[in-house]
């Protein structure tokens, strides 16, 4: 059976720093593609936001992660030279560099192989609302 490919994108409006779960939108798109086996690649087209697979059962997990990153990469550090877009911009770039801008998720039996408590998140690193785009590529049969 020849491999087939599908591409798409999901707009993700954010309200500022934090985690925005997109698991349902991604899974719905994958189901609509009609493939049984394959590999999904997700890519966020931004340098101040990232993608994570993280626990989606207990909201304290993403809350604690956000607090950890706030401490790890604080705003207003005099080390930063790039400040023309505001005090949250360079920390956002550092956070994106420490996390991921793309994910690969296998698909088996028509479903993504996420674990029981795993969800897909856009991790917004800027204080202001933004319109983010996650590009998707699915290849398989």
Image (cartoon, helix red, strand yellow):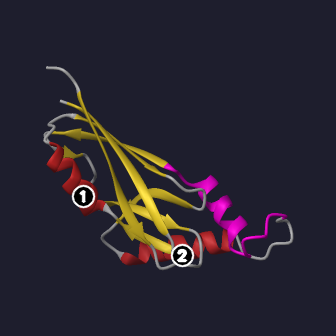
Magenta extent: 81-101
Element assignment for label 2: loop
Q: Residue at x 51, y 77 (%)?
A: 129
For residue 116, the mark is: 1
Q: Residue at x 22, y 52 (%)?
A: 29
Q: Which residue is drawn at 56% across and 54% down?
A: 99
In which quadrant of the rendered image does the C terminus lie? top left
Q: Indicate whether residue 94 is drawn in magenta.
A: yes
Q: Which residue is drawn at 13% across and 41% down?
A: 34
Q: In this view, does 82 lie to the left or right of 120?
A: right
In this rendering, the answer to whether 107 lies above or below 132 is: above
Q: Which residue lies furthest to the top in this view?
A: 1
In this rendering, the answer to whether 2 lies above or below 66 is: above
Give coordinates of residue 14: x percent, y percent: 45, 74
Image label count: 2
Answer whether labels 1 and 2 touch (C-beta < 8 Å). no
Q: Which residue lies under the disc numbered 2?
A: 17
Give coordinates of residue 58: x percent, y percent: 34, 74
């Amino acid at each position: 059976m020849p491999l087939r490919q599908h591409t798409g994108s999901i707009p993700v409006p954010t309200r500022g720093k934090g985690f925005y779960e997109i698991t349902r939108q991604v899974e719905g798109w994958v189901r609509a593609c009609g493939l049984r086996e394959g590999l999904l690649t997700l890519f966020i087209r931004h340098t101040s936001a990232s993608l994570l697979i993280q626990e989606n059962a207990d909201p304290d997990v993403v809350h604690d992660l956000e607090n950890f990153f706030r401490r790890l990469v604080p705003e207003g550090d005099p080390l930063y030279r790039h400040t023309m877009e505001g005090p949250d911009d360079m920390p956002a770039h550092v956070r994106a560099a420490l996390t991921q801008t793309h994910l690969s998720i296998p698909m088996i039996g028509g479903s993504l192989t996420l674990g029981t408590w795993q969800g897909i998140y856009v991790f917004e690193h800027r204080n202001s609302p933004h319109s983010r785009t996650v590009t998707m590529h699915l290849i398989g049969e």
